[in-house]
Image (cartoon, rainbow, N blue to C red):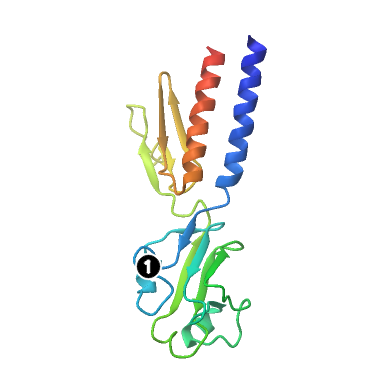
Amino acid sequence: MASSLLAAVAVVMAAAATVFVGAASGASYTVGEPGGGWDTQTNLTAWASTVDLRRGDQLVFRYDASAYDVVEVTRAGYLSCSAASPVSAALRTGNDVVRLDGAAGWRYFIYGVEGRCAAGMKLQVRVTDAGAGCNNTLPSPSLAPAPPGAPSPGINICSGGPPTVIMTPGVISYGAAPRSSANLSSSLLVAMVSLLLGIIVV
């Protein structure tokens, strides 16, 4: 019986590893949605302020390919609305995916034809490391306060990171709201593995 339980745990752990690799690929954000897109009617600056982009995420540009394109440019190109020195070749499919890999920092996109960029068809986004902005701390489960000058005891919960599992006898709780369905799946698998391991140990 013990060997069949160990085999079941091995299968679940292999499935969990597969999901975790998929979850690490990041979230997908369609530029301007909901209610807008890659066009002059959408306030792209306001849209960019609503998303928390991390390395490994991707931007999806959807637009009329017969009328528009997307060009990634430098900051100078963004400010001057010039596609003369692009970072990469212009995208023209109407359903372009840009992976936000590489170093954290600012990325700049414009419509490559003069006029529309100056009318607002440009986007600057900030890409952060996965742990950046992690400042949510749950209070310590202990009743004793931290000594003066010591860091406050607690548990950091970071949105978009791997799920945080806090286990006490008889209770499993989760932190960090999932950023994508892949993270939700990984949270469920962590719970299943935790339960299985708890059953085997007991």
User: SS of the residue at dot 1?
Assistant: helix
- Which residue sits at x=43%, y=41%? 156
> Up-down: is 199 above or below 57?
above
Work out whether residue 131 or residue 63 is closer to the camera in this orientation and state it.
63
Residue 163 is left or right of residue 10, and the answer is: left
Name the residue at the front extreme: 66
* Coordinates of residue 9 in the picture (x, y in percent): 61, 23
Point out residue 168 in the picture as x, y percentages from the top left corner. Answer: 42, 23
Compared to residue 189, the image places residue 109 above or below, namely: below
Task: Give me the residue at 61% from left, 33% from top.
Answer: 15
Q: Quadrant of residue 102?
A: bottom right
Q: Quadrant of the N terminus?
A: top right
Residue beneath disc 1: 47
Q: Is residue 65 above or below residue 6?
A: below
Neighbours of disc 1 within 10 Å: few (<14), some (14-19), many (20+)? some
Please name whichever residue, 19 or 151, is drawn nearer the observer in this view of the structure.
19
Most extreme residue toward the top is 1
Question: Measured from the top left, where is residue 118 in percent x and y?
Answer: 42, 87
Image location (x, y in percent) of residue 194: 51, 25
Q: Residue at x 50, y 39 (%)?
A: 185
Q: Residue 46's image quarter? A: bottom left
Instruction: Name the quadrant containing residue 149.
Output: top left
Q: Nearer the viewer, residue 143 or 79?
A: 79
**Mark 1 residue type:** Trp
Decide which of 173, 98 is in the foreground and name it.
98
- Above/below status of 202 relative to 108: above
Identify the residue at horizontal 44%, vertical 73% (top origin): 38
